[in-house]
Image: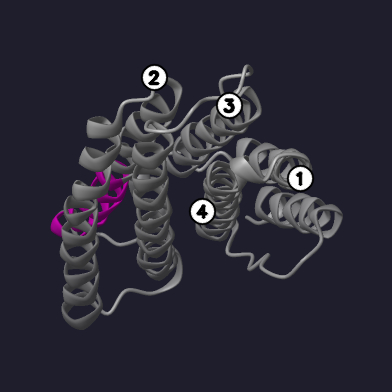
Amino acid sequence: MEVEAISQHTSRSFNKDLAGIHNLVLNMGGLVEDQFERAVKAIAEADSELGLGVAESDRQVNEMEMRIDEECRRILATRAPAAGDLRLIVAAMKTITDLERIGDETEKIGKLASRLATVKRPSTNFRELRNLAQHVKGMIRDALDAFARLDVQQGLAVMKADKVVDEEYEAIARQSLTFMLEDPRTITREMDVSWAARALERIGDHTKNICEHAIYMAHGTDIRHTSLKSVESEVRQAGSMKESSP
């Protein structure tokens, strides 16, 4: 669904403003996605310098959040949007907050990757952590795609995937605790692994939030604090009402 399809406003310049906000959010998402990929690469390749570079790049993410927030506030003040137009602005402001927090968590991962690059690596080469990172990477990609196309079904699929991420995080935390109990020399390393896994789990949560914002933008349904089963039901009802309306 195109951004212009949300708006019932007749002003071409207003539609251009809304499309601009939508594109800026996606550009910020692309920046965060690139930052995340470099953090994961730093872990996989034991690249301390790359990890530190990821941490430094978070400033760009913060600056972009401020730029988009300012533009959204300008539109709210000068255009007085309503209905679908207002939903787009609200969803955009909430989404950039989650993207900024993903950037913060990715910054942590970059710093942890830099430290992990200097210690003796286990025989698995952090396989479980890298697998978790790949799942989260897919969630980020699919969430941004759902936001771009207002694809409710894809958004729901990402929300379901978050449960797998939670389970993998818990498994890594248990494994790290076992390693620390068996060999105290691994405590520092395994603490860093646990913190990195925790950051990945939090990124999954923020990615899930982005999908909630996309669904709100598409259907006007606030699905926060709602079970996934109820969300699917509400989305179906919203879709049926939209189809039956004249």
Q: Residue at x 56, y 60 (%)?
A: 216
CA–CA distance between discs 4 and 2?
30 Å
Q: Earlier in the sequence, mark 2 or mark 1?
A: 2
Foreground: disc 4 or disc 2: 2
Q: Earlier in the sequence, mark 1 or mark 3?
A: 3
CA–CA distance between discs 2 and 1?
28 Å
Tell me, yes or no, whether the two marked residues, 2 and 3, touch with CB atoms within 8 Å.
Answer: no
Q: Over which residues does the magenta segment extend?
A: 13-28
CA–CA distance between discs 2 and 3?
11 Å
Question: How many neighbours does mark 1 have within 10 angstroms: few (below 14), some (14-19), or many (20 or more)?
Answer: some
Amino acid type assigned to the residue bearing label 1 in the image: Lys
- SS category of the residue bearing label 1: helix
Q: Earlier in the sequence, mark 4 or mark 3?
A: 3
Regarding residue 152, the answer to whether it shows in the image is: no
Question: How many neighbours does mark 4 have within 10 angstroms: few (below 14), some (14-19), or many (20 or more)?
Answer: many
Residue 233 located within the stretch drawn in magenta: no
The residue singled out by tag 4 in the image is 210
CA–CA distance between discs 4 and 1?
16 Å
The residue singled out by tag 2 in the image is 45
Q: Position of residue 208 (x, y in %)?
A: 60, 51
The residue singled out by tag 1 in the image is 163
Tell me, yes or no, whether the two marked residues, 4 and 2, touch with CB atoms within 8 Å.
Answer: no
Q: Earlier in the sequence, mark 4 or mark 2?
A: 2
Amino acid type assigned to the residue bearing label 2 in the image: Glu
